[in-house]
Image (cartoon, grey):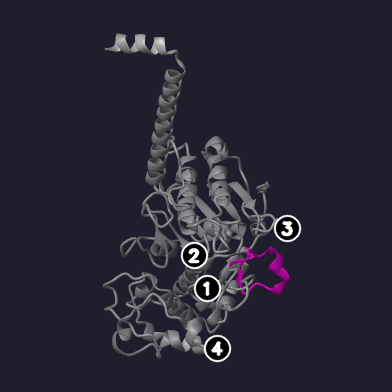
Amino acid sequence: MLRIVVTVLGLASGSDGLPSKKPAAVGMSAVRLESVERIVTRGIDAGGYPGAAVVVGRKGAVVLQRGFGRLSWSEASNSVSPDTSIYDVASLTKVVGTTAAIMALYDDGKIQLAAPVTRYLPQFTGGLNDMVTVADLLTHRSGLPAARNLWRGAATPDAARAMVMSTRVKDIPGRKYEYSDLGADVLGFIVEAVSQQPLDVFLHNRVFGPLGMRNTFFRPADSLRYRVAPTELISPRGYPIHGQVHDENAFALGGVAGHAGLFSTASDLSIFAQMMLDGGSYQGVRIFADTTVALFTRRVAGHRALGWDTADGDYGSGRYLTPRAYGHTGFTGTSMWIDPDREMFVILLTNRVHGAKARHPGRVISDVRSDLSDAAVLAVIDGPRGAMKMPTAFRADRRDGWNGDTQKVRAAKAAAATAARKSATARRARTRAAAAKKRAPASTRGKRSGATR
């Protein structure tokens, strides 16, 4: 039986999370928000993930904060709590971690976006590499490939780093979009070179610590393992992954990488999201200049901003976020979307890579991400045109392709089943009629026969 943990928040300090308010107090409908429970629970029931942490916030307060299911499929595992359950956030590392570090150094005047990468990393040189700028890396237009199998070719973190730095740019920088983990790793190296600190140390000192994000870090301590959601059951490392970064290349880099490796709770991420909505400050603590937040979250190349993705009706953002909304997703089943026009954010953390029982868990998490965003936005009732029309069904209600069948296939199967039932009914009727005819007296059969003729 699914267990749901509802966290009731009171007014709290920044280190304990955002204050809570009833939906009506921030222009939202509690009744409409109830669809969130159905959407997330359907994903669990379909075998997409064993549990999830969800936070929806608006106008400086949390309106929904819930844990669903458990950290693993085991009945003995802990229930999910948005306050304490720690998830591997995968590519959310790129924005909450690496991009945040670049934003801070940009604010400090230590990094220029138009500067060539070689200014900060002289060894990143040769051919087209010399043309790559920091902005190219942030928009995934550096010309670097998506990734390399560092975990196969490097025996140590230093060797993995050398592999990244030796990667040759294959396309003219700025011309073509290709989502690149390697580009994010190079950004992480820039942070370390400029700050003269490891990436994780710089982020703790400059961002997470000042915000009171106590449960956000790389390489969780063993003492926290009971609170960490496990990920891969069968991995190239030869053992189940629990408390280590799921991404093999990030693990090869020592667990701290620009593209992955960060762990966090939904509650901690809500503080970060609110800080971004507040223009770079939170409860009197300024992390970024408001102009820096505006610069980095503005769409500049296709659907990409600087480091951040933007809501484009796809990539898990749903249909209803405004054009200025931005966020990111993570391979492990995570997402965070921030809509400055509506003053709201939506956070989802899952471990859908943990022995998913659905045939197509990627379809499950994609639909649930989008549905969650849509349900949160549709719960806003104080928009300029009032409440938007609710759909007759969410993606999670249709479950297209979750376990092999699409809606069209299911409809065809249903029609075929109906036709088969009708055919069987007709056959039974003919059989009964024939049997009745045989049982009738001969004189009766003759009279009927003559009457027919």
Residue 76 marker: 3
Q: Position of residue 101 (x, y in %)?
A: 50, 72
Q: Is residue 343 visible?
A: no
- Circles 1 and 2 in contact, beta carbons < 8 Å: yes
Horizontally, is 433 left or right of 449 in the view? Answer: right
| Residue that carries the numbered disc 1 in the rendered image | 247
Instruction: Report helix, strand or loop for mark 4.
Output: loop
- Residues 342 and 400: in front is 400
Location of the C terminus (image quadrant): top left
Report, in whole angstroms, how far the alpha carbon at label 2 lies from the one at label 3.
26 Å
**Which residue corresponds to mark 2?**
331
295 inside magenta stretch:
no
Label 1 is placed on what type of residue? Asp
Q: Which residues are magenta?
A: 212-231
Residues at badges 1 and 3 in contact (C-beta under 8 Å)?
Answer: no
Q: Does label 1 or label 4 sit earlier along the sequence?
A: 4
> Most prominent secondary structure in the magenta stretch?
loop
Rendering quarter of residue 70: bottom right
